[in-house]
Every structure is written in C-alpha cells, then in structure tokens.
Image (cartoon, coloured by chain):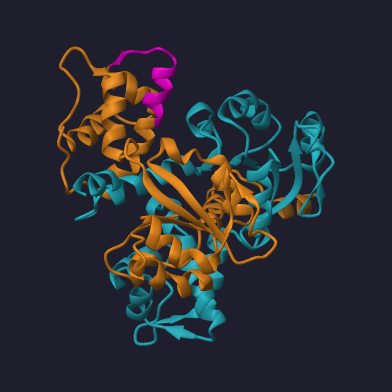
Chain colours: A orange, B cyan
Amino acid sequence: MKQDRHVSPSVINRLPRYYRFLRDLLGRGVTRISSKELAELMNVTASQIRQDLNCFGGFGQQGYGYNVELLHKEIGSILGVDRLTPAVLIGAGNLGKTLANQVNLSTRGFRLIGAFDKSPAIIGTDLVGLTVQNIDSLEAFCRRYNPKAAIICIPKEAAAAMAGDLISWGIVGFWNFSSYDFTQNHQGVTAVNVHLGDSVMTLSYLIKHMDGFQEEAETEDDA
Amino acid sequence: MKQDRHVSPSVINRLPRYYRFLRDLLGRGVTRISSKELAELMNVTASQIRQDLNCFGGFGQQGYGYNVELLHKEIGSILGVDRLTPAVLIGAGNLGKTLANQVNLSTRGFRLIGAFDKSPAIIGTDLVGLTVQNIDSLEAFCRRYNPKAAIICIPKEAAAAMAGDLISWGIVGFWNFSSYDFTQNHQGVTAVNVHLGDSVMTLSYLIKHMDGFQEEAETEDDA
C-alpha cells in the first residue's frame, strides 16, 4: 500500500493511536472490526477513520470492515516501526534514564545504540544495557556508527550549543525534550518536541475553566 | 481581560508556548514587541498571534505592539498558573520521580501535596520534599486535603482500576502518562494525555518519510 507523501501533520499524529488501539485489539484476539466499532472504541467518528486511512490508500473492505492484523501491520509499516533507526541518547540523567527504561524504542522504530552525558557521576553507569559514554566521544561514535536520531534530554542552552555539531555528524531526527527548536533553526532535519511544562500548563487551563470549578482560595473565602 | 469560554483546543495548546517565549523575552530584558517580531521568533504568522490573542480580548496596541510583562502576566492568568491547584502524584517510580523533579509545577499552576505508590521499596522514600505514601492511604488523604488534580504514572490497567475511585474522591483533572483514557470513560473530568510511545512513533514516521532518507539496511545492501 503506497502512502501519499502529502499527509497532514494531524493525520500523522493520529497514526500511532490507531496503531496502539489495533495492538490492543490483536492482544484481545479480535481479528476484524468495522470502522463504526473502531470509531466507538477510539472516540472518533467512523468518517474520520475512513478519511485518515484513505490517505494511505484505505484498507477496509465494504461489508467486512478492517482485518485487524493486516491493518496493524500496514500502519506499523507506514510508521516505520519495522525498520529500526539507530539513535543516541544525549543526556543520561533522570529524564534520559527514565525514557530509555520506560519507552520500548525497539517496538517503535528505533534502536538505541549509545548514551552520552557530560557528568562524571553518570559516565560509566549502565543504561538499559549500554554504558553511558563521555559526551566528548560522541563525534567519533557518530562517524563510526552513524546514528540518525537523537533523544535530547539536556537543557535548552546545551541543546542549542550542540545542535549544529549533531546535524553535521549525521543526526536528522530529534525526539526533543528541551525547549530548543531544532527545525526552526536548522534545515533538513525533523523533530518531535515534547514540552512537559507546556503540557501541564494546558491542564491548568482546562481545570480552571471547567464549569463550576472552585478554586481552593475562593472556597476558603466563603467560609 | 475576560476570556471567551469557547476557545478552540488548538489555541489552548498554543498558549503555554506564548507564555514560554514571553518569559524568555522578559528574562532578556525585552519590554515590548510587535506581533511581527514575536511571530518571527515563534515561527508562526503575525495574523495567527493576533487571532489567538483576540480569543481573550486582544492585548496589543496599534503602533506599539505588546507590552511583554503585561502580556506574560495576562496569559499566565488565563492559564491559571497564578492559582495553584493541589495535586497528587499516583505512581512514584522512575517516571513519577523524574516528572516531580524535572517539571516545576508551582510555576505552572499546581502544588504537589502528596505522592503515592504501592511498592514497599518506594513507600517512605523522599520525593521533592514529600514522603511517598502507601496508595492505600490515598482515600483518607483526598478527603482531608482535597487534591483536585492527579499525575498518573501507573500502567493502563492500574489507572483503569483506580479511575472511578479517584473521581469519587474529588479529582477532576489528570496529567496522564498512562494509556487509559479518563475523559472517554468518565463524565465531568478533564485530562492532558502524554503518550511518550506515540510521540516517538511519530518521529519514526517523520524520519522515514524525509526526502532522501537512507535506511541503514539499504545502505548495507548497496555495499
């Protein structure tokens, strides 16, 4: 199934969710599902599912629905989880360690081949079977092993200072937990930015704008 | 400045980014900025900035631009970062500990008042000045201290099993790192979901669909 090269960012952002729900279905032994059932499960409309999947040629059969195993495999292939991109972790402190332990990269399109830090307390420690290396050895490592992706778990200033080097050493994709903007500042690279601080502020907004939400201080004033 | 109650989710998701850029500007001593300059800095269009801020009444002055300090303060107030919602951390393992250490909640609208886990190895340990408590004591804690938000760092099944209780004990907002869907399964609650696994799969897609991206295996086959 050949995918369209001009798929909108929102469709791309939804693909992993389809993949996740299909994996759950597979795990529960479901072999086929209608777009209506899948829509109810995922809390979207059946027409959105059909539209999204049509970007890649569509996979459903009239009157049959979707073959769960096939669709899971096809979406996985579109996401590229079946071809592992070599990746390095930049910054092996708490956040980097947690990500490496928490997220199974090898089922999500990446193979972690190196972890780097500048702190003497962290260099030499184990991280999911890798020995954390001195950041000073990263250039030689990149030239030898050709990682294409980097997981950025260092502060904005450090990320800004390293970005040009990383790109010149062959890194083209960033899973970026810093607030440095790689794609804004450099050509020919791609990034997914995870701003944990932004995300929790969005929750603050949503909570404080809920109907009938009582702020604690107001409750106290009422007493 | 009174905000509109019907603000689109994408505007809400962009607000924390405005807040972050304005904080950076403030830190650099910038006191006023035109929407054009702010747009260039943030890599969006000036008209998007004006439209977004108009949802809340607009803040610019013709020929002057934006007062950075005032706009930062107003957006902070819209986000509710100036009124701290009491929150509990559910699951104080690596991810929970990392979030509590990494993200300064008190500048982002929340006050962490308790941390809970079921593991005897974690209960009793320190977490940003709090002592991790047994999850069994959470109900009594909620009834006494009235937390309104929960940071969910437990697996999907555990989150599903606890969700009803948490809501009945007064939790209305979830910063959710599990793949359990709180808002789909319950009424009258809000959530921001952070799917780390989805986010790295999106990066896999983006890298593998870059123009000219060479998969490693292909490169080897060429040799």
- The picture places residue A87, in percent across and down from the top left corner, at 42, 51
Residue A67, placed above or below residue B140: above
Q: Nearer the viewer, residue B163 or B128?
A: B128
Residue A165, placed above or below residue B186: below
- The picture places residue B62, in percent across and down from the top left corner, at 35, 83
- The picture places residue B33, in percent across and down from the top left corner, at 42, 83
Q: Is residue B170 left or right of residue A186?
A: right
Magenta region: A20-33
A31 in magenta: yes
Q: Is residue B84 visible?
A: no
- The picture places residue A29, in percent across and down from the top left corner, at 40, 12
User: Residue B142, located in which quarter of the rendered image?
Assistant: top right
The structure residue drawn at horizontal position 71% and vertical position 32%, both measured from the top left corner, is: B169
- Please give the count of numbered marks on the rendered protein: 0
Q: Is residue B211 left or right of residue A117?
A: left
Q: Is residue B143 visible?
A: yes
The structure residue drawn at horizontal position 56% and vertical position 71%, both measured from the top left corner, is: B73
The structure residue drawn at horizontal position 47% and vertical position 75%, both measured from the top left corner, is: A161
The structure residue drawn at horizontal position 22% and vertical position 44%, both measured from the top left corner, is: B221
User: Residue A144, located in which quarter of the rendered image?
Assistant: bottom left
In the image as oriented, which residue stretches furthest toward the front? B223
A203 in magenta: no
Q: Is residue B168 left or right of residue A99?
A: right
Q: Is residue A106 left or right of residue A125?
A: left
